[in-house]
């Protein structure tokens, strides 16, 4: 898998959630902060205001996409001056959060202009969150632009249709569409960073061919007996320049990232499969189950067997 696909697949846990919500002005809906999650809001019809907890209000129009990668609390309203008209929406709100596909929720005000929003959330494992996601800002706003990002618009349209009108197969379609939506949002944002120039960190790394080649090699085959020299060869650089370049952009040495990714992959396998420890050890590059257990305990603070039982 490529880096971005792997990041989404490994850090996500639990069930993604989405709801199609219709409000009549005046209205104001608070969304509670949910650490260990990432949320999005897409305006399908009308307009509204996004009121972040620690930033200036942002006016949203039909087609705008907002992504909150750290589950930050925020409010949507028809106007910044509108008082609260509904209790805060949180993880326990059965109308908006329990299922993939929720029926339309009509939060009627006084019959004013209608705003339709597609909202949703991804549950992430805070102990396995990839550093790529940790470097994202609290709020990513992708304004609607005619003719731009057609793949994102298509994903939104398909997801909205499934959530508004659940049918046979919706439970399979919605999770896939939510993943596609998340990937398109991240791809657009990282591509946008690179076009600005002078980027650093993961935004620069994903647009740096040598470092990206090494990352793809690690993610494609984490069990391979990688060395700095072998990864440098994948990157097309000599050993020392590659090591400096990788550490500068990724924030840790190549073999440090390799070990972290192996242990992150192992944790996912322990949680999602019944494979024996020796098999998981081999899948992440350890010929000795004992060596694997020691490495896992150094990273996660517990033995693999204990981690699996607790999970």
Image (cartoon, helix red, strand yellow):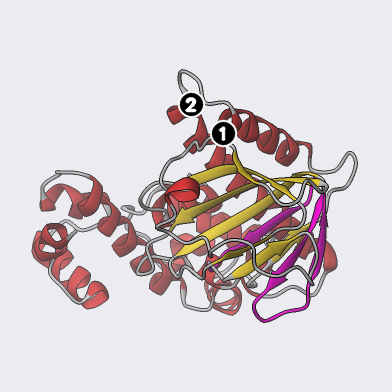
Q: Nearer the viewer, residue 98 or 110?
A: 110
Residue at the spot of label 2: 170
Image point (52%, 68%), residue name: 32
In the rendered structure, find residue 297 and report the number of the disc placed on it: none
In the image, farthest residue toward the front: 110
**Does the magenta run of residues contain 65?**
yes
Residue 308: give x, y in percent of width and height.
Answer: 15, 58
In the rendered structure, find residue 163 and report the number of the disc placed on it: 1
Query: Earlier along the polypeptide chain: callout 2 or callout 1?
Result: 1
Give SS at disc 2.
helix
Residue 68: give x, y in percent of width and height.
Answer: 61, 64
State which quadrant residue 140 falls in.
bottom right
How crowded pointer 2 is (Cα within 10 Å; few <14, some 14-19, many 20+) is rated as: some
Residue 118: give x, y in percent of width and height.
Answer: 64, 45
Residue 236 visible here? no
**Where 90 sits versus 179, above or below?**
below
Q: Nearer the viewer, residue 111 or 263?
A: 111
In the image, farthest residue toward the right: 146
CB contact under 8 Å: marks 2 and 1: yes
State which quadrant residue 54 falls in.
bottom right
Q: Quadrant of the C terminus?
A: bottom left
**Does the magenta run of residues contain 161?**
no
Residue 279 visible here? yes
**Where 136 sits versus 210, above or below?**
below
Give SS at disc 1.
helix
The range drawn in magenta is: 47-70
Residue 190: give x, y in percent of width and height.
Answer: 70, 59
State which quadrant residue 210 falls in.
bottom right
**Where 197 sits versus 157, above or below?**
below
Image point (75%, 68%), residue name: 82
């Amino acid at each position: 898998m490529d880096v971005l696909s792997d990041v989404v697949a490994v850090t996500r846990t639990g069930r993604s959630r989405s709801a199609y919500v219709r409000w009549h002005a005046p209205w104001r809906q608070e969304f509670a902060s949910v650490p260990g999650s990432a949320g999005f809001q897409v305006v399908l019809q009308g307009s509204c205001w996004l009121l972040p907890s620690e930033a200036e209000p942002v006016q949203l129009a039909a087609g705008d996409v907002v992504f909150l990668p750290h589950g930050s609390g925020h409010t949507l309203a028809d106007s910044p001056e509108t008082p609260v008209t509904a209790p805060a929406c949180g993880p326990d709100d059965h109308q908006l959060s329990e299922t993939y596909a929720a029926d339309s929720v009509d939060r009627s005000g006084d019959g004013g202009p209608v705003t339709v929003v597609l909202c949703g959330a991804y549950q992430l494992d805070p102990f396995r969150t990839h550093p790529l996601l940790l470097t994202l800002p609290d709020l990513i706003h992708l304004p609607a632009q005619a003719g731009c990002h057609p793949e994102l618009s298509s994903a939104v349209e398909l997801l909205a249709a499934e959530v508004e009108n659940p049918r046979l197969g919706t439970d399979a379609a919605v999770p896939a569409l939510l993943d596609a939506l998340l990937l398109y949002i991240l791809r657009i944002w990282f591509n946008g960073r690179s076009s600005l120039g002078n980027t650093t960190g993961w935004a620069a790394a994903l647009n740096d061919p040598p470092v990206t080649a090494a990352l793809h090699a690690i993610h494609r085959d984490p069990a391979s007996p990688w060395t700095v020299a072998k990864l440098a060869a994948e990157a097309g650089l000599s050993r020392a320049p590659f090591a400096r370049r990788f550490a500068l952009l990724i924030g840790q040495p190549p073999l440090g990232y390799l070990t972290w990714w192996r242990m992150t992959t192992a944790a996912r396998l322990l949680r999602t499969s019944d494979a024996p420890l020796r098999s998981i050890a081999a899948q992440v590059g350890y010929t000795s189950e004992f060596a694997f257990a020691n490495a896992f305990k150094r990273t996660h603070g517990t033995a693999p067997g204990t981690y699996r039982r607790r999970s």
